[in-house]
Structures are given as C-alpha cells and as structure tokens.
Amino acid sequence: MPYSIAMVSDFFFPQPGGVESHIYQLSSKLVDRGHKVVIITHAYGGRNGIRYLTNGLKVYHVPFYVVYRETTFPTVFSFFPIFRNIIIREQIDIVHGHGSLSNLCHEAILHARTMGLRTVFTDHSLFGFADAASILTNKLLKFTLSDVDHVICVSHTCKENTVLRAALDPLMVSVIPNAIQAENFRPLNYDHRVKKASNEFQINSIPRRVGQDDIITIVVVSRLFYNKGTDLLIAVIPPILASDPNVRFVIAGSGPMAIDLEQMLERRVLQDRVELLGPVRHEEVRDVMVRGHIYLHPSLTEAFGTVIVEAASCGLYVVCTQVGGIPEVLPSEMTQFAKPEEDDLVAATLRAISALRNGKVHPQRFHDQVKAMYSWTDVARRTERVYHGITGAISEQEFYGFADEYDGEWSATRSRAGIQNFALIDRLKRYYGCGIWAGKLFCLCVVVDFLLFVFLEFWFPRAGIDIAKNWPKKDPTEKKSTHSNKQHGRLKTRRHRSRVESDDNSHG
C-alpha cells in the first residue's frame, strides 16, 4: 500500500550532516518502493519555494527566520496555515519529523495530529538531564511525543535516552540505525577488474602496506563544535605528532571553534603537519577520507555516528570515543575505543598507528563488511513497516510482537502502546499528564491549535486548494511490454531477413 509522506525538519541540504543525509537517502528509497515523499524545511540562502531533486523528490523551502544552528524561530502557530496548505496540496497521509532540536518538526507533529494525520518521530541525538538547555529540550520533546503514533531511534542507546527523556512506553519506540551508500565510499585502490572463472566480475580490495617509516595520515571530518569534541581534538594533536614524526593530520569541517584550532597550530608551529580544509560538501567527503589511514572521532556525545561508518567503508581504521551509541556501530576489529579523555585518546591513536605499521589490521577489507551491514534499502523497508503498523495495515500483535496466548497479560500495555486516538478529549488527557503547570499549558496550546484549524477550514476551505500533480513514474509492466515488443520486432526482422535470403537463393 503506497503512502504519501511528509518528511519535516529544519535540517536538510545544502547543509551537510548526518540528519540531512538520513532524510534524503530514506526519502529516495521510499520513493523507489512506490511511496510519495515530500520534504518540508526552511529556506537556505537563495533556496525558496519548491525544488525538485532526483527521483521526483519534492522539497518545500518555507521562508522562516533562522535563529541558531539552522533552526527556525519557534512560533507554535504561524507555521500552521502554510503547513496545512502543503498537506492538502500533496494529499499527505503520514507526517514524519526528524530531530529533537528542529522547531519545524515539533510544530508539524502538533499540527498534523490536529488535522487527523498519523505521525512518526525520529530522534538522532542524545541529551542530558541536568543542565538548563537539556531540561527545556526534554520538556519540549515530552510535549511533542505525548501525542505521536510511533518513535524511531538510530541506536539502542538513543532509544534508552529518548524513553527516559520523554517518559515513553518502550514498545512504541523502534530502533532503525542509519546507513550509508557504500558505493559512494570505496577505498582508493578498490579494484573492479578482477575476473572470476565464471566470467563474472568480482570486487577485489588490495590492502595497502604501511611501512615503519611511511607517512600515516589521520583524517578528521567533523563540525567544529564543543559536543563534537573539538576541545579534545585540539588537546590530542600535539602529543600525537610529538610521539611520531611520520604522522600528519587532515581536518575537514567548520564551526565556532575553528579559530581555537588555528590558534593552537600557530602557537605550536604545526601548520606543516596539520592541513585544515575548512567546510567540505558531502560528495567530497570520500575524497578527503581516502587520503588517510586512520579516522579520528573525538566526539563527546553521539547517538550513532554515520561518519564512522563512512570512514570504515573508505578503508580507514577508526579511533573513536566510547560514548553514546558509537560502540554499537562497528565491530571491535574495525575500531580502537578510548574514553573521552586526552591521555586515553592519545594512547588509542598510538595503538592504531602501531597496529597499521605491524600489519595487524587490514582496513581495506572493511568496505565489503560495511556494505553487508548497512543498507538504505533495509532502513526504508523497516521504516515502511512502522508506517504499516501505525496505519493499521498490519495487526498490533504483529507490529508490537504480542502473542495471542498472552492476551490478558498484554491488555494494559496494548492500550498504552496502541495507535493513538484523534479525539480532542483523549489528546488533552495525554497532554495533561505532562506536569502540574506544563500539562495545563500544553492543553491550552492544543485547544488554540484546534480552534485555528477550525478557522482555517472555514475561511480557507479545502476545495479552494489545488491538488499538486504527482511526479510521473514509469509503469514496470509497461517497461516489460516495451521490452517484449522490442524482442518481437527483432524476431520479425530476423524472419524477414531469412525469407529474403531464401528467395535470393531460389532465384540464384
């Protein structure tokens, strides 16, 4: 059953990042599986209005004011009129929001529930519980997820974090990891020209040998923010370079802490051994990574870490901090783990250098393993199953894993984890339990949102909104018939030629 899906987030291309790549790749694969997908984000520079990407993927760039790190200014209600217009134009069935810090995502889920649409939320981040920013973010997340049909997290650590932050039933949270397009992240000497006896080409990877005196290049591709471990990176570069004269760094990325990194290099006079590339586009990441032997990831918090998978796919040995969901991403033979501390990260990097020089690891073989582990086609299939579950296309027993023989035992859980009701009174009950004061405020927001919806339905009726035409798609049956027609035409041509030849022979 095909769905019309709206992916909503503040974070999308042309800004590079894991969330942006996730939305694009997942949307493209869902389109390949026969669904209709539109993406709703804010305007980026000169990108306003509607843009079309490959596969007929449509992007709505809404002109809203951006306040911090590409997130729009929260207005709660002003997004509703244009959001309703898009939803009706595109005949959307499911609204899928991405990112705890995305204002558009939170508002879209609220408005979608008011309009009677099914909603899904994907969390890509980890947050704490003690500082003021985390407390406010968690309360906002609790508001949004009190009335959502299902939640997806990119790792089991992320799921545990989200369940605690939003006080969710674990049954309504699924774990679907990120993936990569492995074909776009091949090692430098990945050879396609090796032929098997059966005349089929096979992929072959030739491992690079690193001698004791060869230069080893350590690559870092990251946004230069505090949570990405830029402070830790600045601290570990000098001791790593001092311990081995044949080590070089290549660092790609930008951010507010780039100036701190540059000042350290000038103070230590390390400009000849550390190359700063600045911001790079996502399609250029592979070209940066294949220049190195080791990928260093000093992040302080990470729900998944897609860039780690990309590095391993490019044939790099990964050194990373053991935080968040990172230990779930790659097997131990591909990584050297370290605590998020200066001394331990330096020691782990030196161990990785020693392992490469002594031939104990062969990172060029990682690509085939990563390709087998992570696939966007699999991510799309599992996400599609979530859509089936929240729309009732599959039974709750199948979706949540209930067994018929435990019907009585699961009855209470089933009422909590089942498909959410759209009735306003039921929605208010769910929001009211969010806190003594917050619950009342949330209920007020829902009531105002409902009244605004009634006003829009009366003054701007649906009949006055044009329905957008879908991107034309080729019918696979038509393709098969075209192919058979071509074969039939070739057969007729051969018969005609043979008839002419036979006539010529008879005349001769």
Image (cartoon, rainbow, N blue to C red):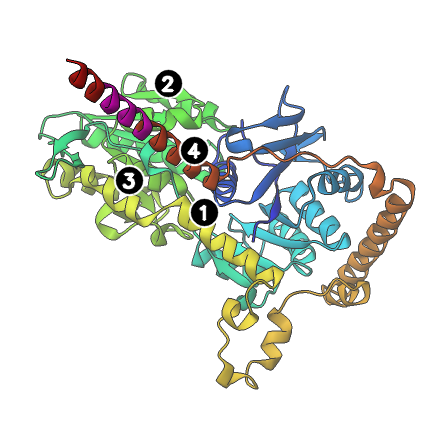
- Which residue is at 63% across, 60% downward? 149
Q: Nearer the viewer, mark 3 or mark 2?
A: 3
- Which residue is at 58% across, 45% downward? 98
Q: Which residue is mark 4?
A: 482
- Chain part drawn in magenta: 491-500
Give the secondary structure at mark 4.
helix
Horizontal side of 125 relative to 292 (left or right) equals right
Q: Are marks 1 and 3 in contact (CB under 8 Å)?
A: no
Q: Which residue is mark 1?
A: 301
Q: Which residue is mark 3?
A: 312
Marks 1 and 3, how far apart at CA: 20 Å
Give the secondary structure at mark 3.
helix
Sequence-wise, which precedes: disc 2 or disc 1? 2
Figure check: 437 above or below 493: below
Q: Secondary structure of the magenta portion, mostly? A: helix
- Name the amino acid type tagged 4: Thr
Horizontal side of 368 relative to 118 (left or right) equals left
- Name the amino acid type tagged 2: Glu
- Name the amino acid type tagged 3: Ala
Picture coordinates of residue 224, whole percent (x, y): 46, 31
Q: Nearer the viewer, mark 4 or mark 1?
A: 4
The image quadrant of residue 245 is top left
Residue 119 highlighted magenta (yes or no): no
Of the pair 8 and 73, the residue shown nearer to us: 8
- Which residue is at 63% across, 35% downward? 470
Label tally: 4
